[in-house]
């Protein structure tokens, strides 16, 4: 076992730095996300589903803010899940499931959650599958529950300004890579692939060259994101509210989009 696996916080720290190169306002997004959760709790401990949770970033921050929360983390990548498991220990339920198919819900330990949270993951799903997933999420949220997605969502009403801001962010990111101050996505996965404990979990290669099924779609322009889930089930009447919830700092392509689930009409209860 390598020193990094013996101390999973080293992997957590390196993952955070790698992600922050893409998302300078990453922690602000998480704060906005958890503010939305807090708003629907009425003082109760939350039951949270960390969707495509990777190393457990959202679960760790959820538990730091709500120590008595029940957290379920779902992902497919075994290396990321190993880091999450070592970091969270028995404080969360960790599930291996493929978001690319509707069957992922059968692995959940609970039928309903107060909140479903995800960040910078769902953009890899094909557009048709993403729409289906949104409908499925309605079925795992309690009435009044909230779904929050923090991801790349440029404002398509400002195409030229957004393009320039994204180019500027890219240049700054590349400068950080060149200086060695942070690892790129591919470099992080190369390090993970060189770690004996993590490498044996992914014998076919690292995530950078072997996207799992749940994230194997073509990464789409965020302007094509479905803004609200399609009515794919009898419970689609629970559409509630949906809107962007901006973090305290807003970058060129950053957004925290959230929505609540309305109570079921009497005829569907």
Image: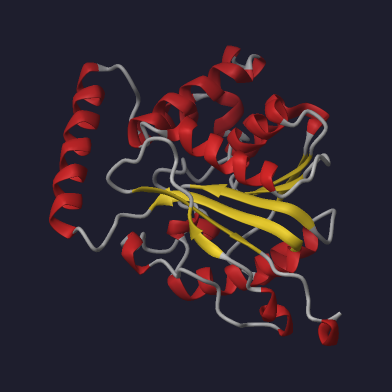
Task: Tell me which corner region of the image, top left, top right, bottom left or bottom right, holds residue 208.
Answer: top left
| Figure label count | 0
Q: Position of residue 110 (x, y in %)?
A: 84, 56
- Compared across the picture, whether 224 is left or right of 268 comes to left
**Residue drawn at point x = 25 percent, y = 25 percent:** 177
Q: Position of residue 251 (x, y in %)?
A: 31, 41
Looking at the image, is 42 positioned above or below residue 141? above
Q: Residue furthest top?
A: 3
Task: Tell me which corner region of the image, top left, top right, bottom left or bottom right, holds residue 26.
Answer: top left
- Compared across the picture, whether 68 is left or right of 196 comes to right
Looking at the image, is 33 positioned above or below residue 177? below
Q: Position of residue 43 (x, y in %)?
A: 81, 39
- Compared across the picture, whether 131 is left or right of 39 comes to left
Looking at the image, is 234 positioned above or below residue 27? below
Q: If the image is split into quadrants, where does the N terminus sit? A: top right
**Residue drawn at point x = 77 percent, y = 55 percent:** 113
**Residue drawn at point x = 63 percent, y = 69 percent:** 240
For this rendering, which residue is in front, 2 or 24? 24
- Compared across the picture, whether 71 is left or right of 77 comes to right
Looking at the image, is 246 positioned above or below residue 212? above
């Amino acid at each position: 076992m390598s020193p990094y696996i013996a101390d999973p916080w080293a992997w957590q720290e390196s993952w955070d730095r790698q992600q922050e190169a893409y998302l300078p306002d990453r922690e602000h997004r998480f704060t906005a996300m958890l503010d939305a959760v807090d708003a629907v709790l009425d003082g109760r401990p939350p039951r949270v589903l960390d969707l495509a949770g990777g190393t457990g970033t959202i679960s760790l921050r959820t538990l730091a803010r709500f120590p008595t929360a029940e957290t379920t983390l779902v992902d497919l990548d075994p290396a990321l899940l190993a880091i999450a498991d070592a970091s969270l220990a028995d404080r969360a339920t960790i599930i291996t499931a493929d978001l690319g198919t509707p069957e992922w819900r059968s692995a959940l330990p609970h039928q309903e959650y107060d909140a479903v949270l995800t960040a910078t993951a769902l953009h890899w799903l094909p557009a048709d599958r993403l729409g289906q997933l949104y409908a499925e999420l309605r079925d795992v949220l309690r009435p009044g529950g909230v779904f929050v997605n923090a991801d790349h969502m440029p404002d398509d009403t400002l195409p030229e300004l957004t393009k320039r801001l994204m180019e500027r962010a890219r240049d700054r990111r590349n400068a950080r890579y060149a200086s060695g101050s942070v690892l790129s996505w591919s470099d992080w996965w190369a390090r993970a692939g060189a770690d004996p404990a993590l490498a044996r979990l992914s014998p076919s290669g690292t995530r950078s060259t072997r996207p799992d099924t749940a994230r194997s779609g073509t990464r789409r322009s965020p302007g094509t994101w479905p803004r609200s889930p399609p009515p794919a089930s009898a419970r689609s009447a629970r559409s509630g509210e949906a809107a962007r919830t901006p973090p305290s700092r807003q970058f060129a392509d950053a957004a925290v989009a959230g929505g609540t689930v309305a109570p079921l009409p009497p005829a569907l209860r």
